Amino acid sequence: MKLRTRLSCFVIAGLWSIFALFPLISYAQTAKPVLAALNKAENTLTLIDPISMKVTAKIPVGDGPHEVVLSSDGKTAFVANYGAQTPGNSISVVDIASAKELRRVDVSPLMRPHGLQVVGGKLYFTSETNRVVARYDPMTYKVDWLMGTGQNTSHMIAVSPDQKRIYTANIASDSITAFEFQNVPPAASKITQIPVGKQPEAIDLSPDGKEVWTGLNAEGMVEIVDTAAARPVAKVNIGGRPYRVRFTPDGKQVVCTMIAAKELLIVDAATRKEVRRMKLEGVPLGIAFSVDGKTAFITMVEPDAVLKIDLAKLEINGRAESGKGPDGIAVFGL
C-alpha cells in the first residue's frame, strides 16, 4: 500500500513538472526574436537573427515586395507585393517557424498594396492605385473592410493602437487623409483631408496620438500635424528627403533615413530640433526598432545590407547581407 502511494505521488509530481513547463515552452516559441527584411530587386524575404545578425532563411515572395510587418506573436510575416513594372495585387503570408510562404492572398481588384500595419490581429494596408485603405483578416483569409481616401497615391499608413484613427500620406495630392471612427472600423466615421507640403510619403503617428509627422519629398522637410486640430502646426527643415520618418517607441525622438545625404538623422520630438546625424556608407531606407528603442535596424542599398545600430552611441553593432535591394523591415522579440 505504501509503495502504491509513493508511486502515485511520484507520477503526480512528474505530471505537475511537465505541466509547469508548458507556459515556458509556449513563451519560448512565441518570443523567439526575428528580423525580417525584404529584397525588392530579387522578390525575397530574408529572416535574420537580430542578436547575432546571421541570416537564417530566404523565402520567395511576390513581385516587387515593398513593405513587411510581423504579427503580434512574431509567428507570421505579411508582405505587400507592390509590383515592379506591372502593378502587384497580392499579400504574401509567411510562416516564420517553417520559413515558408503559407499563401499568397489575391486582393484584386485592389492594386499596388503598400503601407502595412498590424493592429488588433488585423492587417491594414493601402491600395495606392485604387486610392483605398483596406483591412485583411488573417483568420478568414479575406479583405473584410475598405474605405476610399479620395486622394491620389495613398502610399503609407499609420493606425492608432485602438484602431479608431487611421492616417494616410497621399503623395500626389499633397495631403494626409485622417479617418476617425466611433469604434473599430467599420463603425461610423469622419474623414478629414489635411493639406500639407509637396509630396508627403513617410508618415508616423506619435505614441501618444497627438501628432502625425510626414516627410515632404519635394521640400526636404518634415511637416507636423496636430491630430486634435487636424491641421499642420510646424515644418522642420532637415535638409533633404526623408525616406522614412519613425518615432522611437518612447516617443521622445524621431529617426529619419536621409537618401541623398546617406545619413541617419535624429530629431528631438518635443523641441523639433536636430539632435544628431550619423553618416553611412550607403543609402538608408527602412527603419525598425527594438522594443526598448535603444537599437535601430536599418536597410541600406548601394551597398546592400541590413545594419544594427546603437542609437545612444550611433555605432554599428552588426550587419547582415540580406539580398539585393533591401527595403521594408520589421523586428520582433528584441
Image (cartoon, helix red, strand yellow):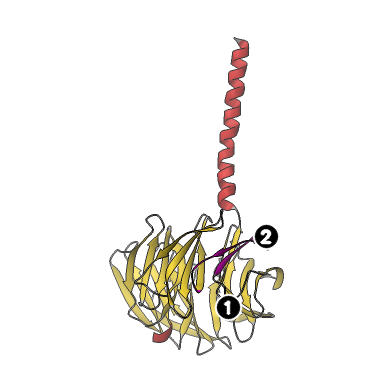
Decide whether residue 297 is among the magenta residues: no
Q: Which residue is mark 1?
A: 256
Q: Quadrant of residue 46?
A: bottom right
Q: Nearer the viewer, mark 1 or mark 2?
A: 2
Residue 233 at least partly seen? yes
Mark 2 Cα shell of 10 Å, populated few (<14), some (14-19), many (≥20): few
Q: Label 2's element?
A: loop
The span shown in magenta is: 44-64
Residue 252 at least partly seen? no
Q: Residue 51 — which label?
A: 2
Q: Nearer the viewer, residue 81 or 130?
A: 81
Residue 93 vs 167, above or below: the answer is above
Q: Amino acid at mark 2?
A: Ile
* Quarter that holds the N terminus: top right
Q: Position of residue 154 (x, y in %)?
A: 40, 78
Q: Position of residue 133 (x, y in %)?
A: 37, 71
Q: Amino acid at mark 1?
A: Cys
Q: Position of residue 110 (x, y in %)?
A: 36, 72
Q: Quadrant of residue 292?
A: bottom right
